[in-house]
Image (tube, helix red, strand yellow):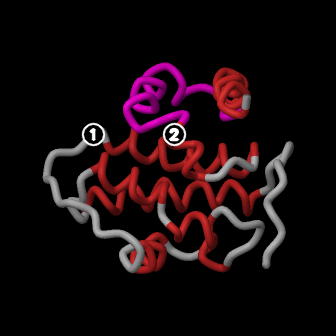
């Protein structure tokens, strides 16, 4: 059994890259015409996140988005939909979901419970140009309230 992740206070290049991969994965899902809402929710709740991506270390964390997608589709069956949200927003959301996991050591499913896609789309408008840590500071209390 792998040890549980611990929060990172300072990121290195590898951790930023892991976040970028998830953003690119979410955009790849759009390019494959998977429904944004359905894909992201199923992904965040998937056993793949729980058993691999949310662990302290998994080779999949550094894999190309195409390889992560191949593995993802072994765990979930997303619906198709040709209408999508803004791809820059989806990229940012994927990035920030993984950033929040690494930064706060909160499981992906809990992150989605507290910040579902609709909330993240609203946050994107004012937050995507801000520093990542500013977003963490703004929403951190939501996760603290969830644990009460």
Query: Position of 50 compared to 124: left or right?
Result: right
- Which of the marked residues, 1 or 2, is nearer the chain's N terminus? 1
- Image height of 86 relative to 42, above or below: above
Q: Between tags 1 and 2, which lies in front? A: 2
- Count of numbered tags: 2
* Residue range highlighted in magenta: 114-133
- Image height of 95 relative to 128, above or below: below
Going 51% across and 34% down the picture, which residue do you hit?
115
Q: Is residue 118 magenta?
A: yes
Binning the other alpha carbons within 10 Å of mark 2 as few (below 14), some (14 to 19) or many (20 upward) gives: some
Return the mark for residue 6: none
Q: Is residue 89 magenta?
A: no
For the residue labelled by badge 2, is the local secondary structure a helix, a strand or a loop?
Answer: helix
**Residue with the mark numbered 2:** 113
For the residue labelled by badge 1, is the local secondary structure a helix, a strand or a loop?
Answer: loop
- Image quarter of the N terminus: bottom right
- Image height of 1 relative to 61, above or below: below
Give the overall secondary structure of the magenta segment.
helix
The percent position of residue 27, horizontal first and vertical second, equals: 36, 55
Query: Position of 142 compared to 8: left or right?
Result: left
- Image height of 130 relative to 68, above or below: above
Binning the other alpha carbons within 10 Å of mark 1 as few (below 14), some (14 to 19) or many (20 upward) gives: few
Cα–Cα span, label 1 and label 2: 20 Å
The percent position of residue 49, horizontal first and vertical second, equals: 56, 64
- Of residues 28 and 8, the one nearer the viewer is 8
- Image quarter of the C terminus: top right
**Residue with the mark numbered 1:** 85
Rendered image quadrant of residue 147: top right
Residue 96 seen in render: no
The percent position of residue 116, horizontal first and vertical second, equals: 45, 37
Going 79% across and 75% down the picture, which residue do you hit?
2
- Residue located farthest toward the front when viewing the structure as drawn: 148
């Amino acid at each position: 059994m792998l040890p549980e992740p611990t929060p990172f206070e300072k990121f290195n290049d590898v951790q930023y890259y892991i976040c970028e991969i998830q953003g690119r994965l979410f955009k790849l899902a759009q390019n494959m015409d998977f429904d944004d809402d359905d894909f992201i929710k199923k992904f965040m709740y998937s056993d793949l996140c729980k058993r691999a991506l949310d662990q302290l270390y998994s080779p999949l964390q550094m894999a190309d988005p195409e390889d992560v997608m191949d593995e993802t589709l072994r765990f979930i069956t997303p619906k198709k939909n040709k209408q999508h949200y803004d791809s820059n927003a989806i990229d940012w959301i994927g990035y920030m979901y993984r950033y929040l996991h690494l930064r706060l050591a909160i499981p992906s499913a809990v992150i989605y419970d507290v910040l579902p896609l609709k909330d993240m789309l609203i946050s994107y408008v004012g937050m995507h140009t801000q520093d990542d840590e500013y977003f963490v500071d703004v929403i951190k209390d939501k996760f603290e309230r969830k644990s009460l």
